[in-house]
């Protein structure tokens, strides 16, 4: 199942030179990116695009390929195995438009999951380029994958290891519009002065930048092939600019994708029910993805103990050097349904994945 481009190393040298040249363009006073990236949004207001997810009534399936970027660490590996388990559970269910699946491994070498999960091996950025911000490898890995892999589907869902698919996912993208989850902490208007370094006024109002990251996003393959190199370069340029790096911190790469999508004129339908994030989101019935990025800490009466180690807890960061054990204790009575569902789904996956704790 593993894949590696036959001509990767010559291509790496070429792309490294390309990266350096494009980086110099972006950080210059008069960046030429805008000359190459025409396109305008098909709407001027955000009010009409925030919506609940509805399964489309289409006779012909519009399949999308699920792509998950990952490393070969234990922490990333166990999350990928759970994610892939639930992808397989729902892939062929009614309402699903999920096609193929690829784990984009940007550790630069094959690992032990190559025969378990379809995997493309990408090289990380050259040493020191990510400045300790490992997420910068994500857009670079997508550039390699899109250029070297054969992707049959016309659309791509960008997802992450700590996503659990709750039910079959339809293709939520429409025409030239992508589909994305709106993050409350991505605030283009608030950071307009910073973002104008990368999204000049000639490209239009700052509202053209959607409040999204790169995941979860469903976007056409053709659009992503244009966006990905820009996303890579904007990410590097933002990280190398002290003001921008300080402003955005750990969500810098998310802003870079939002800017790059806007530079290419790719707007997004914002689906607030695309994903939930327990424990803050309490119900899972309407969603398609559970993102367990936050720790879930509660006392034995079901009261949240956020910021403290709970009497009952589930936090992915507790399992950095070993996977969580099978049959985790379910949360006490009174804990939100979303947390109960999350732990139950983790338990089902680990019970059915061979050699789970090996």
Image: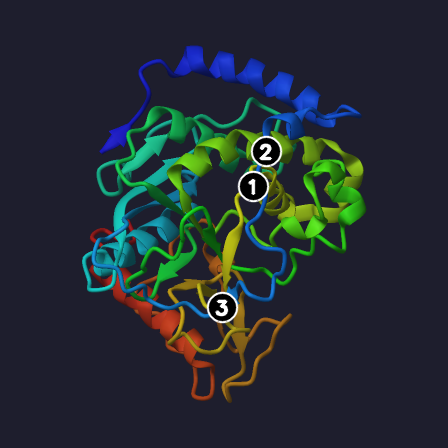
Q: Nearer the viewer, residue 303 or 355?
A: 303
Query: Disc 2 to disc 1, how far (Cα)?
Result: 7 Å
Q: Name which of mark 2 and mark 1 comes first in the sequence.
A: 2
**Disc 3: CA contacts within 10 A as few (<14), some (14-19) or many (>=20):** few
Q: Name which of mark 3 and mark 1 comes first in the sequence.
A: 3
Check the image and report above or below for 250 versus 351. above
Question: What's the residue at 33%, 72% (across, down)?
Answer: 344
| Circle on res. 38 | 2
Whether residue 52 is visible, yes or no, is yes
Q: Are marks 2 and 1 in contact (CB under 8 Å)?
A: yes
- Pinpoint residue 347: horizontal percent, then vertical percent: 30, 67
Whether residue 324 is visible, yes or no, is no
Q: Name which of mark 3 and mark 2 comes first in the sequence.
A: 2
- Pinpoint residue 30: horizontal percent, then vertical percent: 77, 25
Image quarter of residue 122: top left
Check the image and report above or below for 162 versus 2. below
Question: What's the residue at 28%, 59% (across, down)?
Answer: 86
Quarter that holds the N terminus = top left
Q: Nearer the viewer, residue 331 or 214?
A: 214
Q: Nearer the viewer, mark 3 or mark 1?
A: 1
Query: Disc 3 to disc 2, how far (Cα)?
Result: 27 Å
Q: Which residue is mark 1?
A: 265
Query: Disc 3 to disc 1, how far (Cα)?
Result: 21 Å
Per the image, label 1 sits on a secondary structure element best described as loop
**Disc 1: CA contacts within 10 A as few (<14), some (14-19) or many (>=20):** many
Question: What's the residue at 26%, 36% (across, down)?
Answer: 152
Q: Nearer the viewer, residue 313 or 198?
A: 198
Q: Are marks 3 and 1 in contact (CB under 8 Å)?
A: no
- Pinpoint residue 265: horizontal percent, then vertical percent: 56, 41
Q: Nearer the viewer, residue 116 or 94?
A: 94
């Amino acid at each position: 199942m593993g894949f590696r481009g036959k001509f990767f190393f010559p291509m790496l040298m070429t792309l490294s030179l390309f990266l350096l040249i494009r980086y110099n363009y972006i950080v210059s006073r008069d960046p030429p990116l805008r000359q190459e990236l025409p396109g305008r949004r098909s709407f001027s207001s955000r009010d009409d695009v925030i919506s609940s997810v509805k399964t489309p009534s289409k006779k012909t399936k519009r399949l999308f390929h699920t792509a998950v970027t990952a490393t070969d660490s234990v922490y990333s590996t166990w999350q990928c195995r759970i994610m892939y388990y639930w992808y397989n559970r729902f892939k062929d269910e009614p309402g699903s438009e999920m096609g193929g699946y690829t784990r984009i491994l940007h550790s630069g070498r094959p690992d032990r999951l190559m025969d378990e999960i379809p995997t493309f091996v990408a090289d990380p950025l050259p040493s020191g380029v990510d400045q300790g911000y490992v997420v910068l490898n994500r857009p670079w890995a997508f550039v390699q994958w899109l250029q070297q892999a054969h992707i049959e589907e016309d659309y791509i869902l960008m997802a992450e290891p700590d996503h659990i698919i709750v039910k079959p996912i339809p293709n939520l993208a429409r025409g030239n519009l992508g589909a994305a989850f709106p993050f409350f902490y991505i605030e283009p208007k608030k950071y307009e002065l910073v973002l104008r370094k990368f999204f000049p006024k000639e490209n239009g109002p700052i509202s053209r930048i959607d409040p999204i990251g790169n995941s979860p996003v469903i976007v056409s393959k053709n659009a992503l092939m244009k966006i990905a190199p820009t996303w890579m370069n904007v990410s590097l340029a933002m990280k190398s600019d002290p003001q921008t790096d300080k402003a955005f911190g750990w969500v810098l790469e998310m802003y870079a994708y939002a800017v790059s999508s806007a530079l290419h004129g790719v707007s997004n339908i914002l689906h607030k029910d695309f994903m939930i994030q327990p424990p803050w989101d309490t119900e899972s019935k309407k969603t398609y993805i559970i993102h367990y990025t936050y720790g879930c800490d509660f006392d034995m009466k079901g009261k949240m103990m956020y910021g403290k180690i709970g009497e009952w807890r589930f936090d992915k960061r507790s399992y950095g050097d070993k996977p969580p054990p099978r049959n985790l204790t379910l949360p006490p009575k009174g804990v939100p349904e979303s947390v109960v569902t999350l732990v139950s789904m983790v338990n089902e996956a680990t019970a059915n994945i061979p050699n789970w704790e090996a």
